[in-house]
Image (cartoon, rainbow, N blue to C red):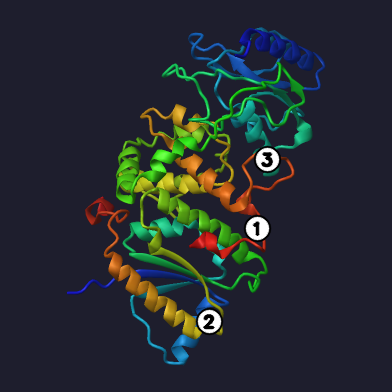
Amino acid sequence: MSFEPKILGIACNWCTYTGADLAGTTRLHYPQNLRVVRVMCSSRINPSFIFRAFQLGADGVLVGGCHPGDCHYNTGNLYARRRLAVTKKILEFAGLEPERFRVEWISASEGNKFAQVVTEFTAQIKELGPQQKLKIDELLEKI
Amino acid sequence: MTDFKQIENNLKKEAKKLLESAEVPVVLAYARGYDDKHPMPFAAKSVADVEKIVFNEYCNFNMARYIMRFPDAAKIAIAAKAADSRALVVLIQEEKVRREDLVILGIPASGMKDPKTDQLIDSRTTGGLYNPVEYDILLGEEIRGQKIASPYAVLADYEAMDKEARWAFWKGQLDKCIRCYACRKACPMCYCDPCFIDQNKPRWADKAPQSPGNMMYHLTRFHHLAGRCIDCGECSRACPVGIPLYLFHKKVAKECEEMFGQAAGMNLEDKPVLVDFRVEDSDQILR
């Protein structure tokens, strides 16, 4: 059986989530590996979400927010940009695969971009294979 | 090399003056521990306490750690070496303490030693500064002409490692962690109450000293100190199992400095980089 990755998508309510809706209503096809969680703003994303997602078995994490300058709350994604950049550097220096974590700015009108990013990212994760380094051994988790 | 005896005398003199004036009820400094090699943090609260104050090459503790323990004190005087003064600057930036409530007794010091190994503390394990960046009274001669090595030079070997080797290294190191939280206790920036690791709702990580919880605790802690860590190296010296935490903190500090052009705790006017932004930050930092 081929490897079907689990990808966590964290999407901002105003842009990326609406963009995903648009991709749906325009009947665009994209891989079903993405599980989307809606948050009100990309700056609501605690970097621990990302570490925790990897621990609980995600093979990739995709964060979507408004384009800088278009944030519904004016400056949220500008804070998020700095914060998530640091997250990426931490993953890199710990020897994890920073490619498994991706941040994209997708606006509400970019259904096409959403479908394209998800397709691309899923292909990339499939190539990388399962994420084993941070994943918690199931037995250990039950204790 | 710093004349430690002279600094100790100056420290006593200034502490006495401040406590006598009754404007400053607490002077944070060092006292003798169970031997000369193990001094301890000390809060002098009366003129009689002043005699107990010591200063020698083993007085490493970052005294900024204790600044929030005295909410009733109108003013606090604090003996601050270079790293301590940077920590104070960050705490002032974060509005944990007000500049006007502090009397910073700056100590220029080189030749500090780690009591565990007796090795010199220099830019390999710390920010490598000798003079305090912010002070009211300087207790010794400013140190000039010291060779300044980049505090980030030590990272080169680790950056050159390939990904798998680096993962093996950090996993090996962090698996040793016994979760005593000495790093958190020693850190002047770790003042959250409750710390994320002590929260039960949500429970961010397992509390058992096993690999997954350790990984979560340390990765998140590295993140929480991004742009705030002032590279005093106290976390690593406090660590009973010898995890070189300072390496990771240095790396994060280096990346922050490169991406955002600002080192932590160097200037009272700055804001810590992660509570600030520039519209012109590049999206390239996310690649």
Q: Is residue B281 left or right of residue B198?
A: right
Q: Is residue A60 left or right of residue A107?
A: left
- Identity of the amino acid at label 1? Phe
Residue A18 marker: 2
Labels 1 and 3 in the same subunit: yes
Mark 3 packing: few (<14 Cα in 10 Å), some, or many (20+)?
A: few
Q: Residue A114: x, y in percent? A: 46, 80
Q: What's the distance in space between the residues labelled 1 and 2, CA to CA? A: 26 Å
Quadrant in which residue A60 is drawn? bottom left
Report the residue at 67% width, 44% height from top. Answer: B94
Q: What's the distance in space between the residues labelled 2 and 3, CA to CA? A: 40 Å
Q: Which residue is mark 3?
A: B96
Tell me the chain of label 1. Answer: B
- Identity of the amino acid at label 2? Thr
Report the residue at 55% width, 24% height from top. Answer: B61
Image quadrant holding the N terminus of chain A, namely bottom left
Q: Which residue is mark 1?
A: B277
- Identity of the amino acid at label 3? Lys
Q: Residue B286: x, y in percent? A: 51, 62
- Using the rendered image of the protein, determine whether residue B225 is visible from the camera's viewpoint: no
- Compared to B271, does A65 lie above or below? below
Quadrant in which residue A116 is drawn? bottom left
Mark 2 packing: few (<14 Cα in 10 Å), some, or many (20+)?
A: many
- Compared to B131, does A91 lie above or below? below
